[in-house]
Image (spheres, rainbow, N blue to C red):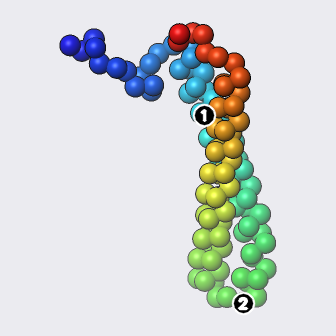
Amino acid sequence: MAKNVAQSPLERSGVASFDQRLMAKRCAHEGVLAGAKAAVIASAKMLPWAKANLNHTAQALIISTVAGAAYFVVADKTVLKSARRNSFNQAEKPNIIGA
């Protein structure tokens, strides 16, 4: 009975699945880099205003919140953009390995 159970895409082994995992890792890495850059830029832009108008605790809270929000928004957009680009690339070339 166990032979009739369908495998999930994550459990499949082979070249196609390795390519997909490699591509997912690359998309995630691009997202992390873009998010980190956005967080640094957002913090740098917010710092002069926070120093002039807020006490130390408020500065830390505001700047860390702005940096975190910028990181997640930009990382998410970058990962989605990479996934969309890769799905269009895969649609152009059919997968003949799994057929």
- Residue position marked by numbered label 2 in the rendering: 53
Residue 25 position, x and y percent, is: 60, 34
The part of the image, by quadrant, that contains residue 67 is bottom right
Q: Amino acid at mark 2?
A: Asn
- Residue position marked by numbered label 1 in the rendering: 25
Q: Is residue 66 above or below residue 11?
A: below
- Residue depicted at 60% across the width and 71% down the height: 65
- Residue depicted at 37% across the width and 21% down the height: 7
The part of the image, by quadrant, that contains residue 84 is top right
- Residue depicted at 64% across the width and 38% down the height: 83
Sooner in the amino-acid sequence: mark 1 or mark 2: 1
- Residue depicted at 59% across the width and 33% down the height: 24
Q: Amino acid at mark 1?
A: Lys
Q: Residues within 10 Å of mark 1 (few under 14, many from 20)?
A: few
Q: Using the rendered image of the protein, determine whether residue 29 is visible from the camera's viewpoint.
A: no
Q: Using the rendered image of the protein, determine whether residue 99 is visible from the camera's viewpoint.
A: yes
Per the model, the C-alpha gap separating discs 1 and 2 is 41 Å
